[in-house]
Image (cartoon, rainbow, N blue to C red):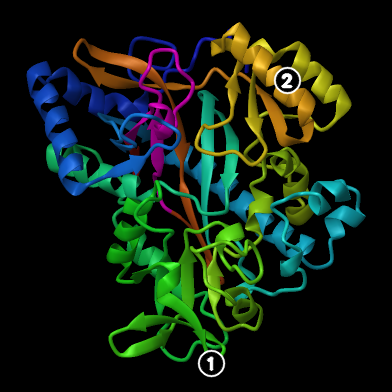
Amino acid sequence: MSKDKQPFDEMFGTGEEPREPYKSYHKWFEGEQNARLRKKAHEAEQAFRRTGITFNVYGREEANERLIPFDIVPHILSNREWQKLSEGIEQRVRALNAFLHDIYHRQEILKAGRIPAHMISNNEAYLPEMIGVEPPGSIYTHIVGTDIVRTGEDEFFVLEDNARTPSGVSYMLENRETMFEMFPELFIQNRVCSVSTYPKRLRRSLAACAPPACDGKPVIAVLTPGIHNSAYFEHAFLADEMGAELVEGHDLRVVNGRVAMRTTQGYTPVDVLYRRVDDAFLDPLNFNPDSMLGVPGILDVYRAGGITIANAPGTGISDDKAIYSYMPDIVEFYTGEKAKLPNVPTWRCSEPDSLAYVLDNLSELVVKEVHGSGGYGMLVGPAASRKEIAEFRAKLKAKPDGYIAQPTLALSTVPIFTNKGLAPRHVDLRPFVLVSPNGIDITPGGLTRVALKKGSLVVNSSQGGGTKDTWVLES
């Protein structure tokens, strides 16, 4: 678990021979010419550019729209490894939904003393407006992205639960399509589980969560903040792939107690809204009055059973990084089982003893904002300068409850393709989960993010990371 531990190499393990999941791929790679692979890597980059797969970088002076680097060496998991992960993820997602229902209703976990009440009541992600509200099908987290890191052969940890508006699934799909176009022979030689049905499964899962007011085939729409959002490509991509409408706040209004979208035939009621707009901007009548991104009155329609909002308002409390530290307790409380996938050890800086430890060991820890995302606002102690550590020390002292800290893990590596051949780089994995009254559906694969800089532990695309295709072998 320490930064001094030699990282686990997922292709080679601890020896020179490739591990079982990589044997077939490695044999193919050894027979390939570097010149051909370089040409294919360039073609893949051009394909992404033509498709328009970009993301926006905030707070930078240079051009803010970038291409996400794609590496042609896949991240491969055996079927056994995947079963271990999927069982742990399913257990966790069930617990998250039970937790959300509980804290907005009876609050049994607080009464039992398993989580301090102030961790909920004082949390900006907790929405009192959701108290007593029963979402259609009792589903709060319709789409979840669970971030997994690995430190050894059978050592997997959950780094984060993305239960608000998890992004990245479009890159999972485009990565697979690009690999299939570049190297079709690999998919003949290797039995790789398909991910291409995700949009169809997403639509089916959302439709199963239709509200009581739905009459007939559910009408589904994707709510985007607009073209300037960092994940706009994904919003448009998923709407198109699902056959759903892509809408902005100004396309919607409340008509006769329903949320309706503007069409050439007038306003048509929407049954399920897959929103990619944060809670605060969802409804200017109930939340931020200055929001131009949401729909005035949508929360009132939602509470009356007139629309399904996916994910439900208020789910942010379940992927809050301070609440994350209680996940082993949450899983055990609602499932009666120990967590199958452990957490990364976490210090809550709101607690005086933990804060003292973190301040004494800043140079060795990773410190994150409780509500942060995308790799912004974090400190990676071993890679930070004295000035950066001093600045973060001041932030922690000023607002300790805004941060958590974790040890610097020796994250596993997967090789990337460079001009000089293969070179190990740190990775993480975000599998995508769909939840409906019909069950939990985990796509076999996910988004592998890779730190392209040698030695870097930061894999976020906004911080210079890239992506890989993720293979789960059928057997």
Does the stretch in magenta take in 415? no
Left/right placement of residue 463 relative to residue 396 reads left
Classify 427 as above or below 473: above
Assign a secondary structure to mark 2: helix
Give the dominant element type of the magenta stretch: helix, strand or loop: loop
Q: Quadrant of residue 175?
A: top left
Residue placed at 64% from the left, 53% from the top? 316
Foreground pick, 151 / 173: 173
Left/right placement of residue 68 relative to residue 48 reads right
Residue placed at 45% from the left, 36% from the top? 429
Foreground pick, 75 / 369: 369
**Residue 283: x, y in percent?**
59, 68
Classify 114 as above or below 155: below
**Residue 163: x, y in percent?**
57, 52
Classify 257 as above or below 207: below
Looking at the image, the residue that sits furthest to the front is 290
Foreground pick, 61 / 458: 61
Q: Mark 2 belongs to which amino acid?
A: Ala
Is residue 218 shown to the viewer in this render? yes
**Residue 451: x, y in percent?**
40, 24
Q: Quadrant of the N terminus?
A: top right
Assign a secondary structure to mark 1: loop
Left/right placement of residue 187 relative to residue 395 reads left
Q: Mark 1 belongs to which amino acid?
A: Asn
Residue at image mark 1: 256
Return the disc, 2 or 1, that comes first in the chain's sequence.
1
Q: Quadrant of residue 62?
A: top left
Does the stretch in magenta take in 463? yes
User: Which segment did they paint magenta?
Assistant: 443-468
Residue placed at 39% from the left, 87% from the top? 267
Residue at image mark 2: 394
Foreground pick, 465 / 160: 465
